[in-house]
Amino acid sequence: MNSDQLSGLMALKAVAEKENFTLGAEALGISPSAISQAIRQLEKRLGVALLSRTTRSTKLTEAGERFLQEAGPALDQIITALNNVGTFAEKPTGTLRLNLPRIVYPNILEPMVTSFAKKYPEITIELYFEDELSDIVSGGFDAGIRLTELTAKDMVAFKIFGPIRHVVVGSPKYFKKNPRPKTPKDLLNHNCICFRFGKASIYDRWEFEHKGVDSQVQVKGSIISNDSFAMLNAALNGIGLTYYIEETIKDELKSGKLEIVLDNYACKGDGFYLYFPKRSQVMPKLRAFIEHIQLEMKKI
């Protein structure tokens, strides 16, 4: 069925219900001439008259009555579906699917998501935690959250949190048995817990910044994980040092369960960004989330 045929069916149904071309046209929000043309084209395709027109009345022919009896229920379902999908363009509703790393959630995003869920109960928020950078479009996600340098270049992005600091941390258990590193090169003598992005890339070149000079140290250790929380737990258990975003472990640092070393060498980053495909219009559910995040950011 093409769009002209669907228009003809809707025109026929409207005129049959109102028994009048003018009233049927008003119900569809089109002109009487347009509705008349749509029905004529439908009759031409079917090769049979569907309406009997006189100067006093407009009635369905026998063929028209049978046609609407059989096609009417399906047409009602189509009209209902069109009306229902229209609500997605009018108000925030539906399921908002977000792809994000676990590390950003507990201390940064969770309060924002909680307040958003209370404000918009009609929206279901689906959180898919994934540390590697995946294609959010092919994955069916509305948006993703990543560090700015990891976002795809063909996306629209705006900051939700930042700036941030990348720091080396360890537990008091670890420092009871191992000296504290004084320079990044001292890490070569330490057990460093590293992160794996996906199947191929291991982040073992830790980045540092000191007095305007950037540097890297390629570290090694007994644990490599693609789960940032597994890395954190290993550090908490005194297995080794790990490279983490300071703002995401503020509770562990405040309680003394973790301690920062090489603080003067901490590398700064722009922060976390929400990103989504370029499009002429953002769906109301995503637009509402963006506006909510922006308001919450002003409170921080």
Image (tube, grey):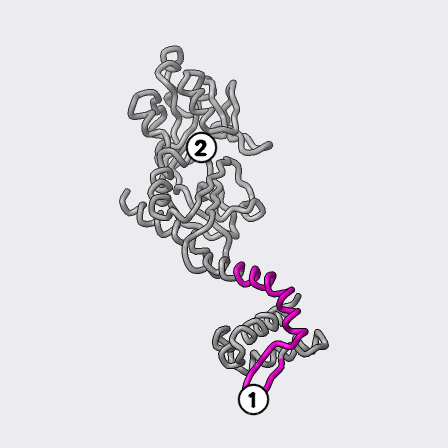
Q: Secondary structure at mark 2?
A: strand
Q: Quadrant of the C terminus?
A: top left
In this orientation, does residue 104 appear?
yes
Q: Which residue position holds label 2?
A: 207
What amino acid type should be assigned to the residue bearing mark 2? Glu
**144 lies above or below 257:** below
Q: Which residue position holds label 1?
A: 55
**200 lies above or below 84:** above
In this view, the mark in front (2 or 1): 1
Q: Quadrant of the N terminus?
A: bottom right
x, y (%) of residue 256?
30, 21
Is residue 294 left or right of 18 when viewed as pictured? left
Q: Which residues are magenta?
A: 52-81
Q: Earlier in the sequence, mark 2 or mark 1?
A: 1
Quarter of the image for residue 210 reads top left
Q: Residues within 10 Å of mark 1 (few under 14, many from 20)?
A: few
In this orientation, does residue 186 appear?
no
Is residue 139 left or right of 292 when viewed as pictured? right
